[in-house]
Amino acid sequence: MSSSLIPVNQATIDELQVLKGIGPKRAERILRYRLEVSKIANVYDLATAAGISLKQANTLSTLVAWHGGQFKATSLLAPAVTFIGSYLLVIYSVSEISFRLNSPTSMLYNASLLLIMIGCISVTFEQLFSFASQQRLTSRFLITLSAASSLLGIASLISLVSLNLILDLSPAFSEKTTATTNFIIFVFLIVFLLYAPGMHLKRISLYDPSATKNLDMAALFFDVGQLTFAVLILLILVAFNSNLWVEELFAIWASVMFMSNGAEMLQGRSAYISLLSDREKAALRFILKEDRAIKSVSPPHRSMRTTGAVLVLVGVMILALAVIELLA
C-alpha cells in the first residue's frame, strides 16, 4: 500500500498528475512551492501549494507520502504549546472558582471561568485531534466552540468588573474578580499578538484560495485590534489594577510589543506581516503571487501610520505607568 503513495516532495510534474484533481498547472505550482517556500510537511502545506481547498487536500493526503520526518517535528510544537498554555489556564481557573454560590455574582463568576475552561479544553482537543490524524483533519466545531466559549467567558468577567463599580460588592470578591479578569485578558493578549497572524494565514490558505482578498482587512483588523488591547491595558493600570504585580509585568512585555509593532506601522508595514515567521512570509508571498487578483503583500491601509503613532505613544505610557507602579 505504502509503495503506491506519491512522494509529494520528490515527485515530478508527471507523477503529481496521478493525484485526482492535480493537472499540469497545479503540479507546476506544487514544484514552485517546494522551491520558493519549503517542503510540503502536512495537509495545510498541500492545500496552499496546490491551490486547493482543505477538503480536497484531506482527500489527497491519503494518497501522499510525507517523506523526511519534518512533519512530526513541526506539528508537535503547536499541540504541545497549546496543551501547556491551556493546562495552566485551566488550573488557574479551577483554583479561582468560588464555592460560595449564595449570590448571582458568584454564580456568574464561576460560569465565566467554566466557559474559559471549556474554550481551553476544546482548543487542546482540536490540536490533539489534528496531530493524531497527521494534520489531515481538523474540527471546525471544536474551533468554533473554543472561540465562542472563551469570548463569552471574558465578556462575562469584564461585566463583573464593571458591576463592581455599580454594586456594593465585597472588597475581597471585587479584588479577586479584577485580578482574575486582568490575568486572563493578558494571556489572551499574548496569544493574539504572537499567534493571530500565523493562525489566520494558515486558515485563509486552506478553505478558498480566493480568500486571500481579505488580507488587507485582516491586517487592518490586527493593527486596530492591538491598539484596542493597548488602550484596555492602559485602562487596567489606571482604574482596575489589583494589588498583585502580575499586571505590571505583563504590561511591560506588552508595551515593548506595542512600540515595536507601532514602529513597523510608522514605516508603512503592517504588524500583521512583521510578526510572521520567515517561512510564513515566504508562504504569504507565494499565495499572493499565485493569486493574480492581488498585487502586493498587504498594502498599507490609510490609517496605518496614524495608528502606529498612537500605538507607540500608548506603549510608552503603559511602560512608564507600569514601572512607576512597580517602584511605588
Image (cartoon, rainbow, N blue to C red):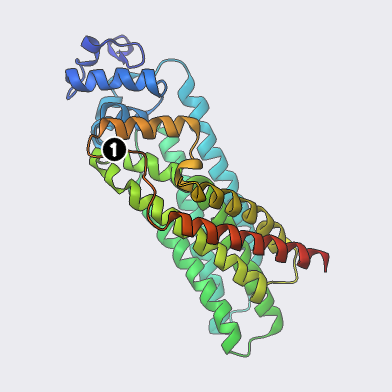
The correct choice, above or below, for 88 with respect to 288 in the image is below
For the C terminus, the image quarter is bottom right
> Which quadrant of the figure has residue 285?
top left
For the N terminus, the image quarter is top left
Q: Choose between 137 and 189: the one closer to the eye.
A: 189
Within 10 Å of disc 1 (Cα), the crowding (few <14, some 14-19, many 20+) is few
Q: State the image coordinates of residue 160 (x, y, percent, origin top left).
A: 55, 78
Q: State the image coordinates of residue 190 (x, y, percent, origin top left).
A: 57, 52
The correct choice, above or below, for 222 with respect to 158 in the image is above
Q: State the image coordinates of residue 314 (x, y, percent, origin top left).
A: 60, 63
Q: Choose between 102 and 182: the one closer to the eye.
A: 182
The correct choice, above or below, for 248 with respect to 218 in the image is below
Q: Secondary structure at mark 1?
A: loop
Instruction: Residue 142: tell me if it is visible.
Output: no
At horizontal 46% and vertical 49% (from top left) the residue drawn is 123
Instruction: Residue 128: tell me if it is visible.
Output: yes
> Which quadrant of the figure has residue 288?
top left
Left or right of 286, for residue 107 = right
The correct choice, above or below, for 314 with respect to 212 in the image is below
Q: State the image coordinates of residue 30 (x, y, percent, origin top left).
A: 29, 21
Left or right of 156, for residue 13 = left
Q: Choose between 197 and 207: the one closer to the eye.
A: 197
At horizontal 29% and vertical 24% (from top left) the residue drawn is 62
Determine which residue is flagged by label 1: 295
At horizontal 37% and vertical 19% (from top left) the residue drawn is 34
At horizontal 25% and vertical 38% (from top left) the residue drawn is 209
Left or right of 38, for residue 255 = right
